[in-house]
Amino acid sequence: MKKGKKNDAADAAAICEAASRPGMRFVPIKSLEQQGVLALHSARSLLVKQQTMLANAIRGLATEFGLTVGLVKGSVKNLGRYAASWIAWWPNRPSSTAALT
């Protein structure tokens, strides 16, 4: 139910109206332990998401240079050794000082 524009007064009125309805179910307050567990799950979920994003970015950059990396977990870790040997072999590679200037 919407009555005009969204502001704090309209929100407070909607909360009071909803709380006075007989069929309204209330959610119990979470304990500190429950909030802590939810925070840990949320943080872990974020870290897993960022880890996946980073691995995909590394795989994409490696593909630009012709290096293919599998989707198997841990394959990106092995990319460093493979890339180092590939760069040492790469003919006509730019010198490290030329890249900085």
Image (tube, rainbow, N blue to C red):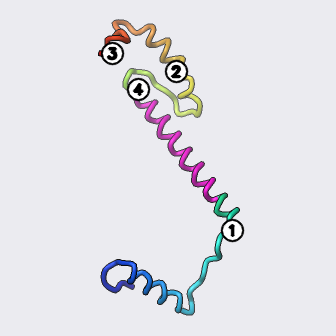
Magenta stretch encompasses residue 54: yes
Q: Which of the two discs, 1 and 2, sits closer to the camera?
A: 1
Looking at marks 4 and 1 on the same chain, the residue that comes earlier in the sequence is marked by: 1
Q: Secondary structure at mark 4?
A: helix
Label drawn at residue 99:
3
Mark 1 and mark 2: Cα distance apart in space: 45 Å
Task: Tell me the magenta residue range.
Answer: 38-61
Q: Badge 2: how crowded within 10 Å, few (<14), some, or many (20+)?
A: few
Instruction: Residue at 39% x, 78% y: name it.
Output: 8
Instruction: Residue at 57% x, 33% y: name it.
Output: 72
Q: Nearer the viewer, residue 51 or 90?
A: 51
Q: Badge 1: how crowded within 10 Å, few (<14), some, or many (20+)?
A: few
* Three-letter code for the amino acid on which mark 2 is drawn: Gly
Quadrant placement of the C terminus = top left
Q: Secondary structure at mark 2?
A: helix
Seen as rendered, the residue at the extreme left is 101
Instruction: Residue at 55% x, 45% y: name it.
Output: 47
Q: Which of the two discs, 4 and 1, sits closer to the camera?
A: 1
User: Dot 1 corresponds to which residue?
Assistant: 31
In the picture shown, does residue 59 fall above or below 65?
Answer: below
